[in-house]
Image: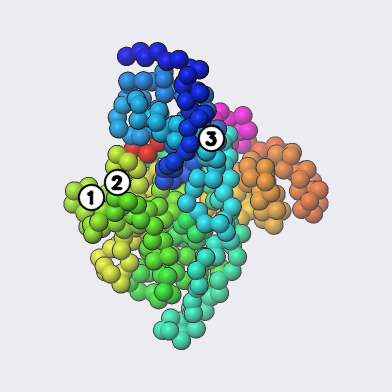
Amino acid sequence: MHVSFNIGVLISLITSATATAMPYGIGCVTDIDTNGSVGVGDVLTIIDSWGTANAEADCNGDGIVGVGDLLMLIDEWGVDCEAIHPFTDDTAVSFDYPGGFVVVMTSGIPDHPTGPFDGSTGCNNPNSVTDQNRTIYIPMVPTPTNNPAIEYLDQPGPLSVSTNGVAMYNPYDAGGVDAPSSICFDEYNGHPSADGSYHYHQWSPALDAMEADGHSGVIGYSFDGYPIFGPWESDNVDAHNGVVNPLDDCHGHTDAIRGYHYHASLPYSEDPNGFPWIMGCYHGEPEIANFDTGGGGGGCDGCAQLMIPPPICNCVHNAPGYEYCCMNWDSACQTYAEQFCGAGFAPPEEPSNRFPNNRPPVKRPPPGR
């Protein structure tokens, strides 16, 4: 089906509209070309796909490109897409469009009280909560896989990040026991590990966002790019025990509004049968730079390949415009390190980069895809 439009009239209509609604998640849903703003290019993509089932342009996820998608675009025209995300103010969120990542910088310290862990309330934990200076890379376009590079249940440490910047771990504590049923937590269901990383093994009451239809809101993002929601599928129906659209082994499922997403279970205190509590596996390929493989904080492949000292790597890739240096250490990173980070080592050779600077912009699927 081919539809003709008067582009001038259409653009005039859009520029006079006022954005009245923002979708959940990260960025604008109608930013089809993934450049940080809704513009003429996105309009033309919708027009070119009018009447088809092109998932890229089907922004509202109803199965066909049409008026609903255009109205959604009008709502988002002029909106600062990079301001749309669920993370709290004490995290720093930036958008790496060439690399295809949303970059989250966080201390890992929550915006709620922690502890006490001195036994005064029944919880003894010898560890202290400390600043983790963590940089996390969330893929803009999740890549589904049946064979992820990281086995979720076997991997210690951070595996996803909550909207308040706190790391989420798998169900097991360091001793290999099911943490929610065996280990003590503070009133927000968190505790620190030996390295000072405060984290959750289960849903925290600090993450209690709800949507109008009774579905839980986004509580975080997995390192594979898929969102994590709270326990509720709808009013008084928790997703873990749901039968209409049951969760898969990874503790996720798909719906027409949100696409594929994970659900955390109710905490152990409310449902002792909620294992695996947050996730059971990665539905998509997790970004390997988020894991502790050496180099700078968060496991920076580019730094690790060249033996860049972690303090130097952190200094550089936490600087605005140099986030990519974590994975792709080049001469610009080296120059910045020498000028501002006290780096006295010889300039490294150019690495064989997994994420070249000239990588074309990626396409981010809208909810419902």
Secondary structure category for the residue under label 1: loop
Amino acid type shown at disc 3: Gly
Of the residues under marks 1 and 3, which one precedes in the sequence?
3
Residue at 40%, 13% in the rendered image:
4
Q: Nearer the viewer, residue 149 or 32?
A: 32
Q: Residues within 10 Å of mark 3 (few under 14, many from 20)?
A: some
Read off the residue under disc 2.
Answer: 253
Residue under label 3: 78
Residue type at tag 1: Pro
Residue 141, can we see it? no
Q: Quadrant of the C terminus?
A: top left
Are the residues flagged by discs 1 and 3 in contact, CB closer than 8 Å? no
Local crowd size for mark 2, using a 10 Å CA cut-off: few (<14), some (14–19), many (≥20) = some
Which residue is drawn at the image coordinates 66% and 38% (left, top)? 351
Give residue 101's position: percent from left, percent from top: 53, 41
Start-end of magenta stretch: 353-363
